[in-house]
Amino acid sequence: MTITRRRISQGVALSTLLAPALWLFPAPAWVFPRQPSSIEQLLARRIAALMAASRELSSLGKHWRRFAARPSVTALLNELFATADLARVLTWSDAELESSLREATRSDYAQGRIDNVGGWLLAATEARVCALVAALD
Amino acid sequence: MIVDARALTADTTIAGDVCVIGAGPAGLTVARELENARVILLESGGLYPSPEVQELARGEIAGESYWSLDTARLRCLGGTSAHWTGWCRPLDELDFAARAWVPESGWPISRAELLPYYVKAQASCDLGALDYDAASWSERLRAPLLPLDPTLARTAVFQMSTPTRFGEKHREALKSSNRIDSYLHATAVELETERRDSRIGALTAISASGGRFRVKAKAFVLAGGGIENCRLLLTSGSPRGLANRHGLVGRFFLEHPHTAVGVLHASSADELRLYQPGCDVEGGHPRAVRGTIVLPAELQAREKLLGCSIGIDPLPRPLPYGADVVTATRTLARRLQGLDVQRGYELLARAEQQPSADSYVRLGSSRDALGVPRVALVWRHHEKTLHSIRRTLEIAALALGRAGVGRVYSYVHGEHRPAGVWPEIFGGYHHMGTTRMHDDPRRGVVDRDCRVHSLENLYVAGSSVFPTGGYTNPTLTLVALASRLAETILRRLS
């Protein structure tokens, strides 16, 4: 193919037309990789997406009594999935992920694991989930 | 008959079998149940409260913040029942026990001994049968019980009286009675002893017009309330007061600390119907019932807590935190427990106070219009009481979460607080403990029969005899004790 001035102009015009579409419908990271995302980051983002209301959860999570110590995403995930391999957890479906968190919450209430999140007396899992969303911010 | 003491000739002497000082629920109960005894009933006020008479009830607040004493008490026929809200529940079994973690706890009588008198008190307060079983009321009213884990929390039911206005209820009977002579506008100011201070020979009273008269009787009953009972003892006899050899008169003042402790965001309004105002009872006896959340006795013992009930009230004020955090909490509850927590209710704690001699009533520095020293109230709440409120809320929040009822925002643990909630503590107009009951005269003012130690014919009726107050309102218990006292006095008179 011969690169002509005309073809360059056509390419620029096409990119200009496509850019808004790419902004609205971003391609997955593997298409345009910027830097590698860790398993922990991917898992944390999946949980945040699963819960929805990320802005509100983040706002609440920042009031968790341990948040001032800047817990890492990894540390929080290890607390949420204490006995599980995070790489394997990442392969769970949304339903399995939600079910696991629900069971952890149920266990928290059964075992008396309550935490103070800015005055809200929540299950330990609930506290760590909103702290996780806040840590992603 | 009812007599206006202002019409009495000065220096008159009136005689009867028993003189009852105070015509509130305790005094009226004693007077009415002293069958076949000639009763002189003295009431400082008139048929209804009036500013001039209320002025006599003014006093000084010298400890923790408290209501003004002429607001918290009413001087009139029927006493403070004229503004009573009607909450009734007997003290729990644990309230009568000597608890190792509550110094100065323990009654010299058992709950079982008081039960027959609680039955009578139910009728006096226009309530139903002596049934405080939560499951029984839940079934009868078809209002669900919260599915609380019984190892953590349970429902304590209160029966709501109409509320009974004792003055209105008994006025006509008193007018037509030829056994009870009720003197209104008659304030007892001094008790006179005889026989080497072993008994009361007479008392001096002053009418609202300033005329003095005396009352002689075989027995005397102080029924003026938790503050006036000790006041009359302190202003009578020796400089230390009557029956005050061990310095206990006025000491161990108890209230029920009330404070709003948080907000419950609940998923179901129907689930809370039994716990809300308006759970009315067909037939009106009682008018309604209200459930509250309390901890079981075993958990109180394990955690070394005082009693405390958590009521679930309609929200009286806007939420003090933003919509963001409410949305976040709703999201968490929905995703992680399948709950839609959208309705807010205020949680109100009503607690038992730690008995302590440093919470007390003493005589003040000023005098009222009758020349009687006013009182000063030094109310103190202690860390144990505050800790019990905090811990009860935490356990209640756990229980409510475990039961899938909702999520709690705690004013105790959070920073978003409107005015008028924790850590502000209010009293409930419940004045207890100032002539406490104990078999040992070194540890109590009255014995198990409510007779003042060292005075063979002076008795005390009312909540001033309570050694501990529990978390329940005192009216039902003080009426029951008054009924028991009437029986005791009759037995001794005969």
Image (cartoon, rainbow, N blue to C red):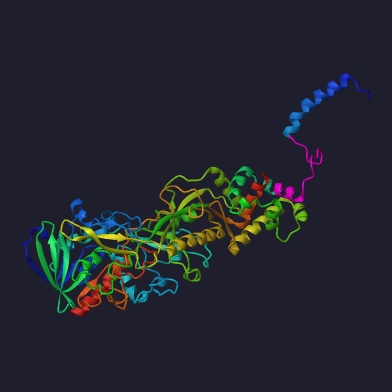
**Image position, residue B327 (x, y; %):** 57, 45
Q: Nearer the viewer, residue B264 or A117?
A: A117
Q: Is residue B403 left or right of residue B278?
A: right
Q: Give the residue at the far right of this rendering.
A: A1
Q: Quadrant of the C terminus of chain B?
A: bottom left
Q: Nearer the viewer, residue B14 or B370?
A: B370
User: Most prominent secondary structure in the magenta stretch?
Assistant: loop
Extent of the magenta region: A25-46
Q: Is residue B332 above or below residue B171?
A: above
Q: Quadrant of the N terminus of chain B?
A: bottom left
**Image position, residue A137 (x, y; %):** 66, 44
Q: Give the residue at the far left of this rendering.
A: B9
Q: Give the residue at the far top of this rendering.
A: A6
- B270 part of magenta stretch: no
Can the viewer see residue B145 in this picture?
A: no
Q: Is residue A54 above or below residue B390?
A: above
State the residue at coordinates (17%, 77%): B197
Q: Is residue B449 above or below residue B427?
A: below
**Image position, residue A80 (x, y; %):** 68, 56
Q: Is residue B437 left or right of residue A59?
A: left
Q: Is residue B183 left or right of residue A125?
A: left
Q: Nearer the viewer, residue B135 or B314?
A: B314
Q: How many marks?
A: 0
Q: Is residue B343 above or below residue B400?
A: above
Can the viewer see residue B418 in this picture?
A: yes
- A41 part of magenta stretch: yes
**Image position, residue B243 (x, y; %):** 23, 73
Q: Residue A26 sits in which quadrant?
A: top right
Q: Nearer the viewer, residue B11 or B242?
A: B242
Q: Residue B139 sits in which quadrant?
A: bottom left
